[in-house]
Image (tube, rainbow, N blue to C red):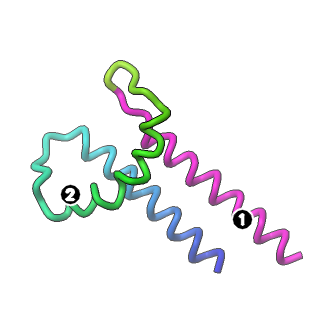
Amino acid sequence: MYLIIHWVISLYSWIIFLWAIMSWLPINFSSKFLYWLNWIVEPFINIFRRFIPTFAGIDFSPIIAILVLQFANRGLALIFVQLLQ
């Protein structure tokens, strides 16, 4: 069970990373892949955008979102270790 959750969180972190990199590139955002990517990432990123302002035009919300996911992943690992003991 933990491995599935760990895999999903890791995959979502990589999707956010890919989305952040692609947002810096001059790409046609009307493609279906980018529409899907935006649809998957934007709701989670918007949670952090409400609280974290941009600094010098740089949006730090993807970095914070990935950090939150990684902390959640580690926290879940600790919970599962405690449950197995």
Q: Where does the image place residue 66, in percent across and percent down from the top left?
A: 50, 48
Query: Residue visible at 64% across and 80% down?
Result: 1
In magenta segment, residue 68 = yes
Q: Which residue is mark 2?
A: 34
Nearer the observer, 61 or 23: 61
Nearer the observer, 14 or 35: 35
* Quarter assignment of residue 77: bottom right
Task: Locate residue 3 relative to residue 84 in the image: left or right.
Answer: left
Specify few, some or many for label 1: CA neighbours under 10 Å numbering under 14, 14-19, or 20 or more.
some
Query: Residue visible at 42% across and 38% down?
Result: 49
Disc 1 on helix, strand or loop?
A: helix
| Dominant secondary-structure state across the stretch colored magenta | helix
* Marks 2 and 1, how far apart at CA: 32 Å
Q: Where does the image place residue 60, in percent across and percent down from the top left?
A: 43, 34
The magenta segment is 58-85
Of the residues shown, which amino acid type is indicated by label 2? Leu
The answer to which of marks 2 and 1 sits earlier in the sequence is: 2
Q: Where does the image place residue 55, in percent across and percent down from the top left?
A: 40, 21
Of the residues shown, which amino acid type is indicated by label 1? Ala
Q: Are marks 2 and 1 in contact (CB under 8 Å)?
A: no
Which of the labelled discs sits on residue 25, or is there none?
none
Q: Which residue is mark 1?
A: 77
* Quarter assignment of residue 37: bottom left
Tell me the quadrant of the picture where the C terminus can be found.
bottom right
Number of numbered labels in the structure image: 2
Query: Residue visible at 31% across and 50% down?
Result: 19
| Image: 28 above or below 36 | above
Query: Residue visible at 51% across and 62% down?
Result: 10
